[in-house]
């Protein structure tokens, strides 16, 4: 086995240069703490980008993984398996869904959702009903279809030609959707209930209600991309339950595996029927190890005490960040829901989010950014209050130094 010592420098020698990872290499995590190669400790408010919803080395998740590892890892979809069936049943019991398709990443779950929407339109109306409406600044993944549906042109640059029939409306602006939607052509409207990557921007309740009605009136499917907002992040199992607006298709990934790659597309029996035998697939989708871990994640996160705990922790963290924002005049607003928070930099600090991230690392706290103007926080849903206090102290020290 290769046990050669490795360092950050090696990244530039052996990796495709599409990422710019930080200077440290974490080697161990426990709860909301992470240690790097030199034994330096950090408090983790990144949560692996809203993935590690039960923190690091959660005993229940380790147990679920080990137990399944000793039984069977993988079968492909030539066979079904017990963990996948149980997980699908749980997802149906806990949500509006009646049918589930498993994938391995958010992008793949969205790819399945968009393909299903087209196929449904094709089957029930005809080939002209293939247009998808999404929103400017939206993020849906990095496959060619999902960057095309996503609303950030820079992610498509140099990869064109893109698939056609995709239109972008303005987020939180129903009028802009009305101009694009039609009974003849629109097969689906896709929206993040909280736009994550582009700055943690929650949808207005009336906006989602209006989209539901527009979709019903135009015989189009409403797709919620809950890859980031799902699995307890908002203090509700899925954000649609908070808004009281039920989609036809919902995609879930990130937190679903708590750090193990797994994703799901949820839908109704009627819509699901359009993905008949052989129309779509994934070798790893529904992998037994992944589903066993996701089962434990859902069984844990769906408990009312955990979801209530998210709200209490969120209040604590939000208040602490607002205080820091006021004291140093760095944040104009702290927005978001539950433990998905976006601290919006004031005019003076606009464009400098990365400097805050780096200053945080120097003080032993890991935060995320969402664009150049927003500090994003997506910690473990069970982060201890004492870790929140200490993370706030460290972040305040970082802000103090940066603003001095
Ligand atoms: C992260 C994210 C995706 C893409 O998920 P991957 O697992 O990286 O493919 C899609 N949609 C939203 C809203 C996301 O936050």
Image: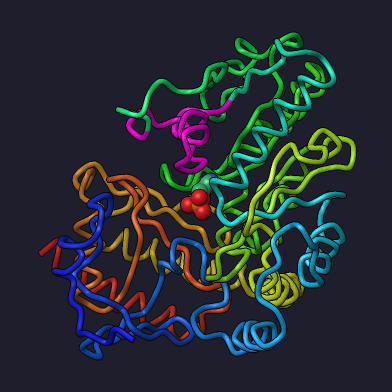
Answer above or below: position of 54 versus 145.
Answer: below
Answer above or below: position of 101 versus 232.
Answer: above
Q: Quadrant of residue 202?
A: top right
State left or right for residue 352 relative to residue 215.
left
Identify which residue is drawn at 58% across, 46% down.
108
Magenta-colored span: 134-155
Judging depth in this view, the residue of 216 and 145 nearest the camera is 145
Q: Quadrant of the N terminus?
A: bottom left
Judging depth in this view, the residue of 2 and 210 nearest the camera is 2
Residue 309 picture location, percent across and down: 64, 75
**Residue 15 drawn in magenta:** no
Identify which residue is drawn at 55% across, 60% down.
254
Judging depth in this view, the residue of 388 and 254 nearest the camera is 254
Residue 64 picture location, percent across and down: 67, 84
Is residue 400 visible in the rendered image? The answer is no
Q: Residue furthest left?
A: 404
Answer above or below: position of 302 versus 146.
Answer: below
Judging depth in this view, the residue of 389 and 178 nearest the camera is 178
Identify which residue is drawn at 51% across, 22% down.
163
State left or right for residue 335 relative to residue 238.
left
Answer above or below: position of 206 versus 58.
Answer: above
Residue 76 picture location, percent across and down: 69, 61
Is residue 131 visible in the rendered image? The answer is yes
State left or right for residue 134 relative to residue 368.
right
Q: Quadrant of the C terminus?
A: bottom left
**Residue 137 drawn in magenta:** yes
Q: Quadrant of residue 48?
A: bottom left
State left or right for residue 91 relative to residue 319.
right
């Amino acid at each position: 086995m290769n046990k050669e010592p490795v360092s950050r420098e090696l990244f530039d020698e052996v990796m495709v240069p599409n990422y710019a990872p930080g200077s440290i290499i974490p080697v161990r995590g426990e709860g909301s703490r992470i240690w790097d190669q030199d034994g330096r400790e950090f408090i983790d408010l990144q949560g692996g980008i809203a993935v590690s919803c039960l923190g690091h080395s959660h005993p229940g998740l380790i147990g679920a993984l080990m137990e399944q590892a000793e039984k069977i890892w993988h079968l492909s979809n030539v066979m079904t398996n017990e963990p996948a069936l149980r997980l699908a049943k749980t997802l149906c019991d806990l949500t509006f869904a009646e049918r589930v398709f498993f994938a391995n990443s958010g992008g793949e779950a969205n790819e399945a959702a968009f393909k299903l929407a087209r196929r449904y339109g094709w089957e029930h109306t005809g080939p002209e009903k293939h247009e998808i409406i999404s929103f400017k600044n939206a993020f849906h993944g990095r496959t060619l279809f999902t960057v095309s549906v996503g609303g950030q042109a820079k992610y498509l640059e140099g990869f064109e030609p893109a698939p056609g029939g995709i239109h972008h409306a303005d987020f939180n602006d129903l009028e802009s959707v009305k101009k694009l939607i039609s009974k003849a052509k629109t097969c689906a409207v896709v929206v993040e209930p909280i736009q994550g990557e582009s700055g943690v921007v929650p949808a207005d309740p009336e906006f989602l209600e209006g989209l539901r009605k527009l979709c019903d009136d135009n015989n189009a499917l409403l797709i919620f991309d809950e890859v980031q907002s799902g699995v307890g992040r908002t203090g509700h199992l899925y954000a649609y339950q908070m808004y009281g607006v039920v989609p036809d298709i919902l995609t879930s990934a990130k937190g679903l595996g708590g750090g193990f790659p797994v994703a799901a597309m949820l839908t109704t029996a009627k819509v699901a029927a359009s993905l008949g035998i052989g129309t779509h697939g994934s070798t790893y989708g529904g992998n037994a190890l992944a589903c066993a871990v996701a089962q434990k994640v859902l069984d844990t996160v769906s408990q009312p005490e955990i979801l209530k705990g998210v709200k209490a922790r969120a209040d604590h963290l939000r208040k602490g960040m607002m205080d820091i924002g006021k004291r140093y005049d760095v944040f104009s607003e702290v927005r978001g829901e539950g433990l998905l928070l976006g601290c919006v930099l004031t005019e003076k600090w606009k464009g400098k989010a990365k400097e805050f991230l780096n200053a945080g690392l120097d003080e032993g706290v890991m935060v995320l950014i969402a664009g150049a103007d927003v500090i994003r926080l997506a910690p473990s849903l069970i982060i201890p209050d004492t870790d929140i206090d200490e993370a706030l102290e460290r972040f305040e020290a970082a802000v103090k130094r940066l603003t001095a």
